[in-house]
Image (cartoon, rainbow, N blue to C red):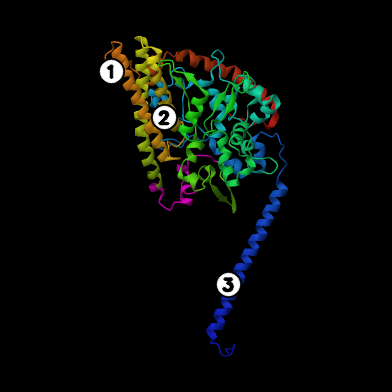
Amino acid sequence: MVTNQSRKPWVNWAIFFVTVVVVFLLGLFASSIIERKGEAQYALQMIKPIAADETRNEVWGENYPREYETYLKTLETDFKSKHGGSAMTDYLELYPELVVMWAGYGFSKDYNQGRGHALAIEDIRNTLRTGGNKVSPMPATCWTCKSTDVPRVMEEQGLAKFYTGTWMENGQEFVNPIGCKDCHDPETMNLAISRPALKEAMERRGKKMEDFSRQEMRSLVCAQCHVEYYFDKKKVEGAQYLTFPWDNGFSADDMEKYYDDIQFTDWTHSLSKAPMLKAQHPDYELFMTGVHAQRGVSCADCHMPYKSEGGVKFTDHHIQSPLNNVANSCQVCHREETDRLIQDVYERQDRLESLRHLAESALAKAHLEAKVAWDNGATESEMKPVLTLLRHSQWRWDWVAAANALGFHSPTEAMRVIGTSIQKAEEARRELAVILVKHGVNYPPKLPDYSTKAKAQVVIGLDMKMLNEDKQEFLKTTAADWDLKAKERQGSLYNYKK
């Protein structure tokens, strides 16, 4: 038996010092717990109750200053990556083929890089797609994802009436841009779904919102808006009812079949006469086909990563490209250097962009060649297979092109879908070649010059001078009147800034 007296002196000293260190560390741990409890208790005492219908982000910010301060950074427009960011980019200037591809549809007038959430109302007012005082505007449904005020107006008017109105009606009601109440329950701060279209889509798939985990909700609150959708005109008479086409699944093929089965068309192309589909921004659907979703990563993990400030951990509400915050987004999981990670993203995006441009070139030519065919006596029976190919090709191109991140949410699936788009566009052109030769037209026919945005808009018959003048008049009169009425209604706390 070894006694204290038989131990060597250094052993006793070692035990003593180890005991001191352990006691010191336990003391620090206990102190940290007490301090954090004190901070939490202090925070609870400082929180002011938030009304169930409170839509002003600055009022929520009184309770959650860190989240609100980072949210305000979505006003910044100075970050530009190789293929995206928050800076203003005119895609019609960069890719004039898009003007031809969208002939007869609002996107041929105006299509810019989306900016931050805090600028949502300013951007939807300014875009030429929503029209002016003279040009017929879009339906009220287009407000759905632009303002925290939307659920209140939906409740006051009833969903059917809201979807039946025009974009101009009640425009003064939509003051507060995308923000806190869109994603949070004001009483519990739990993530919550505030838009009915997502709930309805999930119910048709046999799921309720309470079935989803918190981690899944960190993507689903984004999926209220960052999705493909269409306006169902048959559900309620006279209404443009917002609907997600997820009944068959999330893939481009699944949604294409859904639209074909119900014979839905967004618009008829003014040159080719094809019954077209316009993809919106199927970010969630493309993400769901990728490896990040398969590994349980959420949208917020990359676009709203956690950060620490003063010992407090919170979610960064500066919703932005992960490439502007690699340390807190990508490098949480990936241990490579920042430059290497960014290069990995760009390499995948570059490959997809080269294929995307092939699709755009083929589609623009095909629409113009179809017009030549019609002008030279082509029949509907001859053109029907061509128009179906154009519909499917452009839908598949748009399903990839309209989503943010240039395919990076699911590179493999994006490459597959854009490949089928190219195949169908070239098949349409081969069919058109046969039709044109049959009607005495040499192939390839001479096409008009659409090498710039301005030239392409002339080719499809747009009067851009009139459209711009009408929009400026709207901003000076109607939109200015909306601001005045909103200030009167919301009082001194009104804080919407243009």
Q: Nearer the viewer, mark 3 or mark 2?
A: 2
Looking at the image, which residue is at 54% across and 86% down? 9
Q: Position of residue 147 (x, y in %)?
A: 61, 30
- Identify the element where label 1 is drawn: loop
Label 1 sits on what residue type? Pro
Which one is in front, 147 or 446? 446
Can residue 259 be seen here? yes
Q: Is 48 situated left or right of 6 in this image? A: right
Looking at the image, which residue is at 44% across and 40% down? 410
Q: Position of residue 360 (x, y in %)?
A: 37, 26
Q: CA distance from mark 3 to mark 2?
A: 63 Å
Label 2 sits on what residue type? Trp
Q: Which residue is under mark 2?
A: 397
Task: Of the two numbered discs 3 and 2 on the same chain, state the one appearing first in sequence.
Answer: 3
Circle on res. 21:
3
- Identify the element where label 2 is drawn: helix
Can residue 105 be seen here? no
Magenta range: 318-340
Q: Position of residue 369 (x, y in %)?
A: 34, 17
